[in-house]
Image (spheres, rainbow, N blue to C red):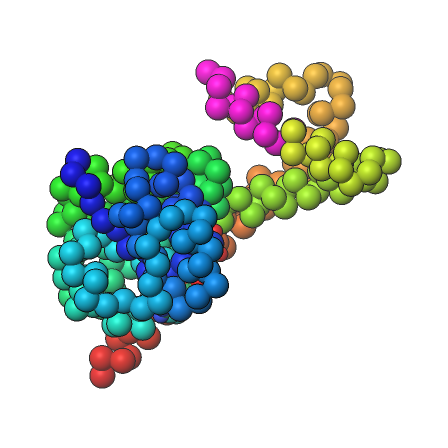
Amino acid sequence: MNRKTIVFYGGGNMASAIISKMVTSDWSGEDIHVIDRNTEKLERFSKQFGVQVHDKPGSWMAQIDSVVLAVKPQQLPDAIASAKEWMDEALIISIAAGVRIEDLRAMLGQNRICRAMPNTPMKIGKGVCGLYATAEADEDHLFIVKVFAACGDLIWCDKEEMLEGVTAVSGSGPAYVFRFIEALENAGIRYGFNEVQARRLAIATVLGSAELARQSDEPPAELRAKVTSKGGTTYEALKVMQERGFMEMMQDAMDACRRRSAELGEAFHENLESKKD
Ligand SMILES: NC(=O)C1=CN([C@@H]2O[C@H](COP(=O)(O)OP(=O)(O)OC[C@H]3O[C@@H](n4cnc5c(N)ncnc54)[C@H](O)[C@@H]3O)[C@@H](O)[C@H]2O)C=CC1
Ligand SMILES: O=C(O)[C@@H]1CCC=N1
């Protein structure tokens, strides 16, 4: 693939996570641009990653191959309006949670669009990102993979709505796992370990189990069964989890997340429609 240029509109947490891995792969900082109104953030991007920084869009964007929309959903209309004239020819990659392609198309006036739902472990190359692109972006799949490849695993969705499911499982998922780590750590402290030891116990357990699950041919349910001796200790813990409805609770939590993602998308859509009148 020829050298291509990319702009991140919004230099926040996610842009930083993605760019930090891009510059360790075959991307040069010279080909990556970041727009943010916060000049301190821009300085950090320039120093840490050697990328090109800008406090606003402008005619310098005219030759750009792709723009990653990495602002918060509510910041998106203003950001797009300010750069629209220079994005006609670019592939647009939006990471904004919930914002639908039909609305991106309406704001951009073009349809070469990919929606992505990344997660924060991308910062260390261990993330997972759901992707969905329009037919107009069919030729861009290789490029899209090149943007995210160093960040972790990539899963293409057959339908756009499946991205709401990606948000529920893996986009917001790191927060559930951190919550679980907090629970393990709190128990460790209650059992007499200091905070550092308790955190080590908790993190090593989650990390080791995830890595074992990744390397094993057996599904997680079998790996669980192997820890659970008949009449033993694990059984007692899992029994409490079952009595308290752990699996149902997790399902309800993810349903709520998915619903919220759809609601945010709908609210965004209605807001956009109301401005048309
Ligand atoms: N944080 C997460 O775990 C995930 C976030 N997302 C999505 O990623 C997007 C970005 O999220 P974060 O990086 O967490 O947000 P953030 O708030 O850290 O970054 C947004 C950046 O955009 C800049 N900005 C906003 N409007 C601007 C404008 N008009 N001109 C110039 N700069 C502007 C802000 O100064 C800020 O630095 C959101 O749409 C979110 O839904 C997606 C997956 C996971
Ligand atoms: O909480 C949020 O809205 C964003 C989207 C996925 C993870 N964080």
Residue at 19% from the left image edge and 66% from the top image edge = 59
Main SS type for the magenta part? helix
Part of the protein shown in magenta: 205-218
Specify whether residue 210 is painted magenta: yes
Which quadrant would residue 67 be assigned to in this image? bottom left
Specify whether residue 216 is painted magenta: yes
Vertical order, 5 against 199 (above or below) = below
Counting from the top left corner in percent of width and height, residue 32 is at 30, 50
Tell me if 105 is positioned left or right of 73 in this view.
left
State the residue lying farthest toward the right: 192
Counting from the top left corner in percent of width and height, residue 17 is at 44, 47
Res 243 visible: no
Counting from the top left corner in percent of width and height, residue 122 is at 44, 41
Residue at 47% from the left image edge and 55% from the top image edge = 44
The C terminus is located in which quarter? bottom left
Tell me if 174 is positioned left or right of 31 in this view.
right
Report the front residue among 100 and 116. Answer: 116
Quadrant position of ligand 1: bottom left
Vertical order, 44 against 21 (above or below) = below
Which quadrant would residue 198 be assigned to in this image? top right
Report the front residue among 265 and 215. Answer: 215
Vertical order, 266 against 258 (above or below) = below
Vertical order, 85 against 161 (above or below) = below
Res 81 visible: yes
